[in-house]
Image: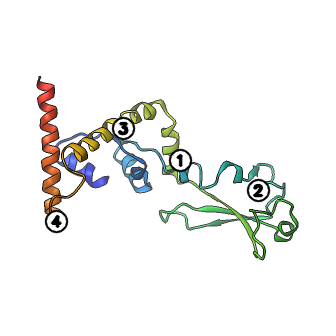
Amino acid sequence: LQTLIEKSKAVGMKVETVIGDAAYSEKDNLAYSAQENIQLVAKLHPLITQGNRKKEDEFEFNKDAGMYVCKAGHLATRRARQGKKGRGENQTDTYYFDVETCKRCLLREGCYKDGAKSKTYSVSIKSDEHLAQAVFQESEVFKTKAKERYKIEAKNSELKHRHGYDVASSSGLIGMEMQGAMAIFAVNLKRILKLMS
């Protein structure tokens, strides 16, 4: 993303907004967009916004105790933070449960594995970039601009299906670049002619 934006700026484009899919919402791109004052309209990956658990597998957080409670009502005994702050990766809070209680629990099926030495529940701590993007993602501006994404996919489909950009017609990167340039040139020329008429 950063390379594409820099190339666009080098040829005189003013980049204010970038619309893309979830692949564009990685942490480095979010930081770069914020630094360059560019709106990045790309949804965060669901693993970041909702985690990798199904709703029915989630534990509840007890605000008074500052700990998670399992579905059977047992409170975690301690909490530890995993990962180094400022290394570009998200940290996690890991909550530890009493294994002896888990061994006797009626709801241990699918929760506690027999013979396990510990029972933990980990929660990812979102970075400042991810938190800011999650807030932006819920705004009306984001939702309105995200509705324009289908136009990009339609143009990609036209390039692939009508102009042969789905399969390389020659080997090597130079051949691919030339094929891409010609396909995009043809599509742009068609669009110019349509707008002129």
- Local packing at callout 4 (Cα closer than 10 Å; few below 14, some 14-19, many 20+) is few
Q: Are marks 2 and 3 in contact (CB under 8 Å)?
A: no
Q: Residue flagged by tag 3: what amino acid is it?
A: Arg
Q: Are marks 2 and 1 in contact (CB under 8 Å)?
A: no
Disc with the residue nearer the chain's start (2 vs 1): 2
Residue 145 sits in which quadrant?
A: top left
What residue is disc 3 on? 149
Marks 1 and 4, how far apart at CA: 43 Å
Marks 2 and 1, how far apart at CA: 22 Å
Disc with the residue nearer the chain's start (1 vs 4): 1
Q: Residue flagged by tag 2: what amino acid is it?
A: Met
Q: Position of residue 67 (x, y in %)?
A: 76, 56
Snapshot colouring: rainbow
What residue is disc 1 on? 131
Callout 2 secondary element: strand
Q: Residue flagged by tag 1: what amino acid is it?
A: Leu
Q: Position of residue 85 (x, y in %)?
A: 55, 64
Q: Residue at x 13, y 31 (%)?
A: 192
Callout 4 secondary element: loop
Residue 106 sits in which quadrant?
A: bottom right
Relative to 14, residue 169 above or below: below
Q: Residue at x 37, y 51 (%)?
A: 32
Q: Residue at x 52, y 36 (%)?
A: 138
Q: Residue flagged by tag 4: what amino acid is it?
A: Ser
What residue is disc 2 on? 67
How many dots with numbers?
4
What residue is disc 4 on? 171
